[in-house]
Image (spheres, coloured by chain):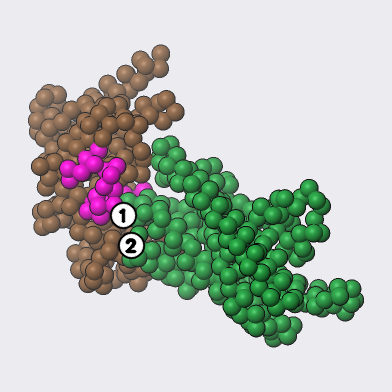
Chain colours: A brown, B green
Amino acid sequence: MFVIETENLVKKFNGVTAVDGLSLRINEGQITGLLGPNGAGKTTTIQMMLDLITPTSGTIKIFGKDMKHNREEILGRINFSSPYVALPGNLKVWENLATFARLYGVKDIKKKIHELADFFEIRNLLQKMTSSLSTGQLTRVNLTKALLNDPELLLLDEPTSSLDPDIADKTRIMLKRIQKERNVSILYTSHNMEEVEELCERVIFISNGKLKDDGTPAELVKKYGHNDLNDVFLSIARENEELKNKNEK
Amino acid sequence: MKWHRIQALLMRHLYLYQRSFPRLMDILYWPVMELLLWGFISIYVAKLNVGGFNVVTVLLGAVIFWDLLSQSQRSVSVAFLEDVWERNFLNIFVTPLRISEFLASAVILAFVRIVMTGVVMGILAAIFYKFNIFIFGFYLVPFVVNLLIFGSALGFFTTAIILRYGTSAQVLAFGFLFLLQPFSAVFYPVSVLPAFVQPIAYALPSTYVFEGMRGVITTGSFSLGYFALALLTNAIYLALILWYFYKMFAKVKIKGRLMKLD
């Protein structure tokens, strides 16, 4: 079963094509990496999946349902986290979490927040102002928010960027635990290829808004004849750059 | 619409207001200052004995009603801007929240704010100027409801403009209403306006509210005609503005600018 299916997804901004006929299928219960160089169309694709951007053409199905006609139901079953999207700093952590728990219609808000706060070890932060937290603490609070509705699908945009190696490692361990214990499907973007190799069971490369390649990290490393996923990324990024320069000429 | 989602946004504002002195000041400071200023002007004009009617009553009534309209519009606009300032749009719109729920929470917040403002101004007017607006009681309620509707509609309009043109247009949230003040017959009847301006005045729901309010305060009688016209023009404005708001929201999603409103 696929949790996400896109068919010929296209997004153009003022004549510039950001996503170009992208057809993807994301498996249930896996951590899938969505990779590509800057400007490849990853963020636009994720934002279309979240109904924040309207596609120019093509379809998006999540849990087998068309996003256009089932937005409310779908968004109630998924969640999103990104270090670039902070929770309001002028509220306490508890207040932010309680607000989002209400938005998702969580039944026992107190119990749910305490359960997740224990999981992410943020109980001591609940009464602190969100603006006073460190980057690592904010990442854990963001992930707590992302699990409030017990999502079946998590979209994570570079969740470990700007974290020090220790906190980044702890975050990866947490993500593995979430996936394993809650059987959550995760679509994950990152520029850290080591992390992707460690976490993702499957990797999708996009370049210039198009699907470039798809497979397990080991399969892709073998296919491109490199030593690791980082080299695969570099060769795809360089190819992408050459193509862009050629198009501009 | 789901109440728990409207409640979530209202609770968020409650969390903010309970420890934000500037936000409370926004509800109380300006209305109180205006009340004091216009109260003393009214007393002075009354002493000149040129009005031939109770100047204090009419002017203070106008000031209080104007502030209710202003609170209503500003409350809706600022409720939206809070999310822009905190870059919180992505967070709330990746939840199942509907636009209608977002707008409904802003209107309820506006209602709470105008009740607070109205009560505080009413009490101060009674203490300082022996003007008891509450004696007009239920006669004024229909007009206050119209002010809430018109203020909210204007709040949606300024919000739609900010969505479309970005935060450089946020000055409208605080100044737009003043464009309508001269034509709304707030402190004087429409008959005072030049003939060519009067059609503009009669196209605004606020004009019927202020004319109706003056009628209640000076004669004690409720004008069903003014009330009906206020309601009718409000319905037209609200429908047009909601259409425009939804259109702008859809456009922003097409342009991919929902996340770039800062």
Q: Residue B176: x and y, percent?
A: 64, 53
- Residue range of the region highlighted in magenta in the rendering: A60-86
**Where is residue A57 shown, x and y percent of the image?**
32, 31
Q: Which element is circle 2 on?
A: loop
- Find out whether the residues at labels 1 and 2 contact each other: C-beta distance under 8 Å: yes
Q: Nearer the viewer, residue A243 or A225?
A: A243
Question: The disc numbered 1 marks a residue on which chain?
Answer: B
Query: Where does the image place residue B113, in percent across and percent down from the top left?
Result: 54, 70
State whether residue A145 appears in this view.
Answer: yes
A113 falls in the magenta region: no
Residue nearest the observer in this picture, A117 or A222: A117
**Left or right relative to B206: residue B253:** left
Q: Which mark is residue B2?
A: 2
Residue that badge 1 annotates: B96
Is residue A189 shown above or below B208?
above
Image x and y of residue B59, in percent: 75, 72
